[in-house]
Amino acid sequence: MSFNAWLIEKFFSRKDRSRKDFGYLEAWVSIIGNILLFLFKFFFGLALNSIALIAEGFHSLSDVLTSIVVLFGFKLGSKPADEKHPFGHGRIEHIATLLIAFMLLLVAYEFGKTSIGRIISSPKVEFSAIVMVFMFLSALIKEWMARFSIFLGKKINSSTLIADAWHHRSDAIASLLVGIGFIFVRFKLFYVDGILGLIVAIFIGLTGVDLIKSSVDFLLGRAPDKDFLDRVRDITLSVPGVLDLHDILVHDYQSNKAISLHIEVEDDLSAKDAHRIALEVQDRLKKRLKESNISVHIDPKGDRED
């Protein structure tokens, strides 16, 4: 058993793990880990007068904010459907993520401006071998967080968790750069601290832009990926009596998907037999995709409208 799988077993006390449970696990692991990293980077950054290290600390803190959004997104998104929201509240997660993305852009701007000033003035930065080693260790920790988020994201098909993984990965790269920066400090090349601080600011900004693009893309109604459509096709064609299918529509509400499709059947079937095939397709899709909002339309062979 891998460490990631072992951690899941230890975290959950029951077998019926919900989508929300996986989101909570990813969020809490990220929150606790990033708070500890932020505190270390921030206070050592102040002690050593390193803007790159301080910027990197706030990059870790931005990951905490994003993870809080993930936490509340899964909490609010798991609310059941109601009269005004017949498909649930799953898209709340992406609306909140947009707010955090704009905050990241503001943080990137402020640190970018400060870093440029450091490049121009080149103030002295204290060298610390311990901090340098810790930054390399921090990069490894953040890369593990990224892989853990991807591992969970793939289990529940969550683009949000995978997006959060790339947030962790950008922090891992930034930590690596700051660690390299301390090597230059050892040789009195203090302006490099400002350059690396600027690079970290750019990483924060790019993360914010990526989150905006991803969230807006989702809210506008992003088309399902090919793998998902292939699964729908394979499951549908496995039902005896289905000749072909077309017009697959998928409306993603994060916590659930509304899926509709047309199946082709023999034109000499009775309405009762055609309906039975449609119900079998619907039942198989619900069971294997774990989605409840599925509509199957029947088209007799040769009546398909192109």
Image (cartoon, helix red, strand yellow):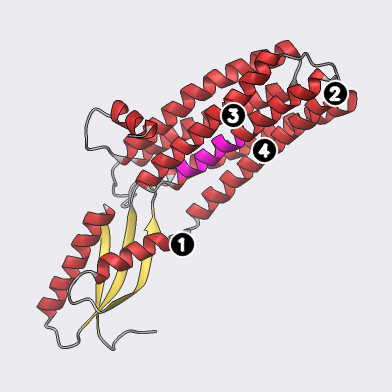
Q: Quadrant of the N terminus?
A: top left
Q: Which residue is mark 4?
A: 203
Of callouts 1 and 2, the N-terminal one: 2
Of callouts 1 and 3, the N-terminal one: 3
Of callouts 4 and 3, the N-terminal one: 3
Contact? badges 1 and 3 (CB < 8 Å): no
Marks 1/3: CA–CA distance: 34 Å
Marks 1/2: CA–CA distance: 49 Å
How many residues crowd around disc 1 within 10 Å: few (fewer than 14), some, or many (20 or more)? few
In the rendered image, the vertical position of residue 244 relative to residue 168, given as above or below: below
x, y (%) of residue 152?
Answer: 39, 40
Which mark is nearer the camera, 1 or 2? 2
Say whether residue 72 is left or right of residue 289.
right
Marks 2/4: CA–CA distance: 22 Å
Which residue is at 47% across, 28% downward? 30
Contact? badges 1 and 4 (CB < 8 Å): no
Which residue is at 13% across, 80% downward? 271
Observer able to see residue 89: no
Q: Which residue is mark 1?
A: 223
Which residue is at 67% across, 38% downward? 203
Q: How many marks?
A: 4
In the rendered image, the vertical position of residue 57 relative to residue 19, given as above or below: above
Q: Which residue is mark 3?
A: 139
Say whether residue 281 is left or right of residue 119.
left
Span shown in magenta: 160-171
Q: Which residue is mark 2?
A: 189
Tell me the chief SS of the magenta region. helix
Which residue is at 28% across, 55% downward? 289
Of callouts 1 and 4, the N-terminal one: 4
